[in-house]
Amino acid sequence: MVGVVAVTADTPRAFMRHSHDQFGLGIILRGAQTSLSGRGTVEARAGDVITVNPNEVHDGAPLGEGGRAWRMLYVDPAVVVGAMETLAEGAAPETELSHPALCDPRAAARFRMLFSAVTNPHGGESEIAGQEALILLLACLSDRPRRAEMHVPAAIERARTRIDDDPAAALTLAELAAVAGVSQFHLLRSFARATGLTPHAYLVQRRLHLARRMIATGSTLADVAQTAGFADQSHMTRLFSRSYGVSPGRYAAAVR
């Protein structure tokens, strides 16, 4: 299914705060975890559906011994928008996935249908099966209006835009503060309050997003690391694995 990437993980690892530029849809297969979400800290156990919105800062840590296992589908925003327009029978209102952790057997069954369509294609049938399963799953997950966006001060937006425009650049805190027109301490404090990440952590996430897109288009890992602004390939691999739970090499094998 175009615009969807499947990932399966089984690990006791705790993941640092990070974000994705896609929607994340998943299910806990075994164990349990606690995670930060746009709606506060939540817990998810085996059978629960888990979700994350694009650019939503989140983390994850196991609950209890033995770690946890899960499956995730990372879905391009355009794919979700198209499905939401189908649900709304017209232009879709601005909505978000409102359940970061949901105990709902129906939603779980629909996720399994979608995951199967994505990972076990059967000719042309997988595309229509996937589209149907995605629409039915989103019907379970998007039943509340989007919450009001947190206001980002203009100064912080200027600094964020500077990072977004060229995440591979060797930026300094002083340069970002100058772009924002505030002191470095003010930038550090206000940026974290507005985005959930420090300027450095936000920069790392943007570099990881760039790396993931380059890997998906067939670039070599060495070229990706250099172009995306990482010190070297091993540096990129460590950060990629800590954020996404899969190495760049395994991710490349999954999407090519």
Image: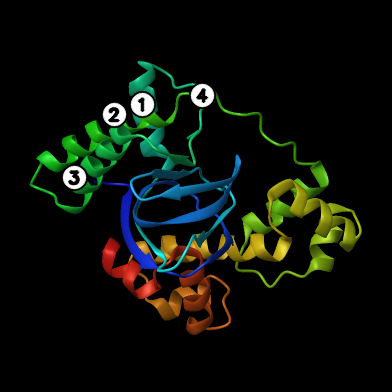
Residue ID at (49%, 84%):
234
Type of residue at label 3? Ala
Disc 3 is placed on an element classified as helix
Give the residue number, with chain letter if any, for mark 4. Answer: 144
Badges 4 and 3: C-beta atoms under 8 Å apart?
Answer: no
Label 3 neighbourhood size at 10 Å, few (<14), some (14-19), many (20+)?
many
Give the residue number, with chain letter if any, for mark 2. Answer: 136
Disc 4 is placed on an element classified as loop
Give the residue number, with chain letter if any, for mark 1. Answer: 139
Q: CA distance from mark 1 to mark 2?
A: 5 Å
Foreground pick, 35 / 222: 35
- Rendered-image quadrant of the C terminus: bottom left
Residue 206: quadrant of the picture: bottom right
Q: Position of residue 132 (x, y in %)?
A: 23, 31
Q: Position of residue 88 (x, y in %)?
A: 39, 18
Residue ID at (10%, 41%):
124
Foreground pick, 82 / 142: 142
Give the residue number, with chain letter if any, for mark 3. Answer: 117
- The numbered mark at residue 116 is none
Q: CA distance from mark 4 to mark 3?
A: 27 Å
Type of residue at label 2? Leu
Q: Is residue 65 above or below residue 91?
A: below
Residue 22 showing in the rendered view: no
**Sequence-wise first label, 4 or 3:** 3
Type of residue at label 1? Ala
Label 2 neighbourhood size at 10 Å, few (<14), some (14-19), many (20+)?
some
**Sequence-wise first label, 2 or 3:** 3
Q: Position of residue 90 (x, y in %)?
A: 38, 16
Badges 1 and 2: C-beta atoms under 8 Å apart?
Answer: yes
Q: CA distance from mark 2 to mark 3?
A: 13 Å
Q: Position of residue 239 (x, y in %)?
A: 53, 73
Badges 1 and 4: C-beta atoms under 8 Å apart?
Answer: no
